[in-house]
Image: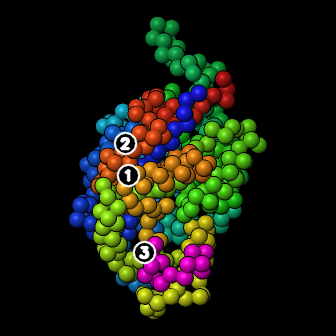
Amino acid sequence: MAARMMRLGMSIRGYGYHPGAWRHPDVPADGPLRVEHYVRNTQVAERGKMDMIFFADGAGIRHGDNPRGAMARIGNDVVEMEPMTLLPALAMVTQYIGLVTTASTTYNEPFNIARKFATLDQISKGRAGWNVVASWSKWEAQNFGLEDVLDYDTRYARAGEFVSVVKGLWDSWEDGALLLDKVSGLYLDETKMHPLNHEGRFFKVRGPLNVAGIPQGHPVIVQAGASEQGRELAAETADVIYCIHDSVGRARDYYDDVKGRLAKYGRSHDDLKIMPAFCPVVAPTRDAARAKFDQLQALVDPLVGLGRLYGTFGDLSEYPLDGPMPDQVMESMELRSVSMQAVERARSDKPTIREMYLRSGITGNARIGTASDIADVMQDWFERGACDGFNITPATLPCGGEDFVEMVVPELRRRGLFRWEYEGKTLRENLGLRPVINRYS
């Protein structure tokens, strides 16, 4: 029996995942607006034989100017390329790595999304993935004629129906439906072309999809929900979960909970890969790794730090930065699970405001050290049943991604935890997922 292998993705959005990243001397300040920046990062990830790159995209700038002056200093996640336009370009300069991006179920229509990802799967020869999100930000809502975001239950109900419609559209054409027979004059076999004729609470879609021969059958579905509704949607529909946990205990509880929901949807344990965010800061020595991290921490403007706390704790700008967190806290209803973890940390650890915003600066579980130190943590989580792998969120790009591929990946291979070569040609094959069977076959 083959050894169980980690699945690894790399999130290559923008400058990296540290709030001081854009100011780092080795990070190109205009990187998010240059295709060359994304080409370099994607090719680095493919050189490391990673399963996929990942774009955590949003439909607009998701920051308010809170406290006043923070917006002008944020840098990260302000301007960037639209990934559904960018990913076909990256497909042409890579061969194996999966290409995954976010597309909202709140501000799109199922037919458009089904068509776009089917086309990306065609262009990439089977490497497309869709990160399903139910958009949470009022700033996004205001770009689409709304004053505020839809309520939580409505967003997730819409998302569930949306994914069902998209999958139905992807099944529009059975294998062999396109005859392309010039002699007989038959272009298609009508018995293998299927209109969807969906009528539901949110959508009415006739179909069929006007893209056929999707290499993966269905592009890989990724989901990031941590709420009760998000977990249930993932158990029913997702192939991969991207999640955020700050401890192996929380990660294991989440893993067991979501995996335990699969059976009622007729799915097995291995039909869903759970890949939490993980941010390694790695160097040949621990002192050098700590120096790298300290350099980034020093680049965080206090207003940017306070802005990162605003959604959960409100405006803390009137309090001394090196004083304790105030007792009165505001729990955000936008990012429930992340905010709850932050509130719990503030209550248990009693950090200063500065310590709190510096601690909250990285997306995911951050580790600082040598390649062996980083691999120890990853191996521990993996072998204790807390994950199936990780979505790497480099502190900086491109250097953080390059450090991981050049130092940590070889260490994981030495331990027999990660591949030396790609096993297949499609993202679904490389993730070890079962082939999709068309519902009409």
The structure residue drawn at horizontal position 61% and vertical position 68%, both measured from the top left corner, is 336
Please tell me whether residue 348 belongs to the stretch shown in magenta: yes
Task: Determine whether 385 is above or below 314 in the image.
Answer: above
Q: Secondary structure at mark 3?
A: helix
Percent across and percent down for residue 95 are 36, 33
Q: Is residue 165 left or right of 416 when viewed as pictured?
A: right
Q: Most extreme residue toward the top, as rendered?
A: 183
Asked if the residue at tag 1 contacts the one at tag 2, i.e. Cβ–Cβ closer than 8 Å, the answer is yes
Q: Residue at x 38, y 52 (%)?
A: 371
Q: Which mark is residue 287?
A: none
Q: Which residues are magenta?
A: 344-359
Q: Where is mark 1, residue-wise? A: 371
Q: Earlier in the sequence, mark 2 or mark 3?
A: 3
- Foreground disc of the pair 1, 3: 1
**Pair 2/3: label in front:** 2
User: What residue is shown with label 3?
Assistant: 358
Under mark 3, the amino acid is: Leu
User: Contact, CB < 8 Å: mark 1 with mark 3?
Assistant: no
Question: What type of secondary structure mainly makes up the magenta span?
Answer: helix
